[in-house]
Image (cartoon, helix red, strand yellow):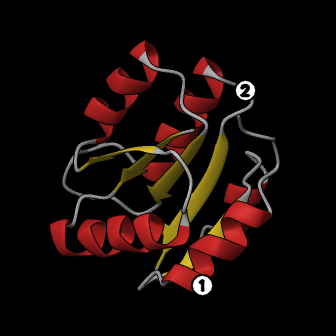
Amino acid sequence: MRIIAVCDNRLILNCLENAIEMAVQSDVDLKTFMLPSEALQYAREHPVDVAFVDIDMKKPLMHGLFLAQKLKELNPRVNLVFVSETDEYATEAWNIPASGYLQKPVKQEQVVRAMGDLRYRTV
């Protein structure tokens, strides 16, 4: 299974990465990105099964919802799990559609639940 995590804050990205690594016990290829453009380029070259996307990224000039839409265009069956401090974008995220919406700081239990509720099956 190929998973990406995208967040423009290094500390939050590291916490998210740790939570994913602790929650997913199987053979997983996990890549992390601070720049949405790099995550998108990676997804063009490698089919992604699950994408954990920070919704409100400010520094890299690409909002998480826009990145999610682009990921869906590349792979309509990608499981999108949004990460946010608030529920401000929840309705928009579910309309993409999302497989999950996690509150920061993300904990292992949240990732376990999200992985169990994926919209599309992964190999």
Whether residue 26 is situated above or below residue 67 in the rendered picture: below
Circle 1 residues within 10 Å: few <14, some 14–19, many ≥20 = few
**Position of residue 36 measured from the top left corner of the image (x, y, whole percent):** 32, 40
Q: Could you say where residue 24 lies in the image, as x and y percent from the top left? A: 54, 62
Label ID, residue 69 = none
The answer to which quarter of the image holds residue 50 is top right
Viewer-proximal residue among 112 and 45: 112
Going by the numbered disc 2, the residue's amino acid type is Pro
Which quadrant of the view contains residue 74? top right
In which quadrant will I find the C terminus?
top right
Tell me if I can see residue 88 in this picture.
no
Please tell me which residue is depicted at 54% across the width and 62% down the height of the picture.
25
Tell me the SS state at disc 1.
helix
Residue type of the residue flagged with mark 1: Glu
- At x 57%, y 38%, the residue is 1
| Side (left or right) of 30 relative to 109 | left
User: What number is the disc on residue 109?
Assistant: 1
Q: Horizontally, is 39 left or right of 50 in the view? A: left
Residue 32 location in percent, x, y?
Answer: 30, 49
The residue that mark 2 highlights is 76
Q: Which residue is located at x 55 percent, y 31 percent?
A: 71
Asked which secondary structure carries label 2, the reply is loop
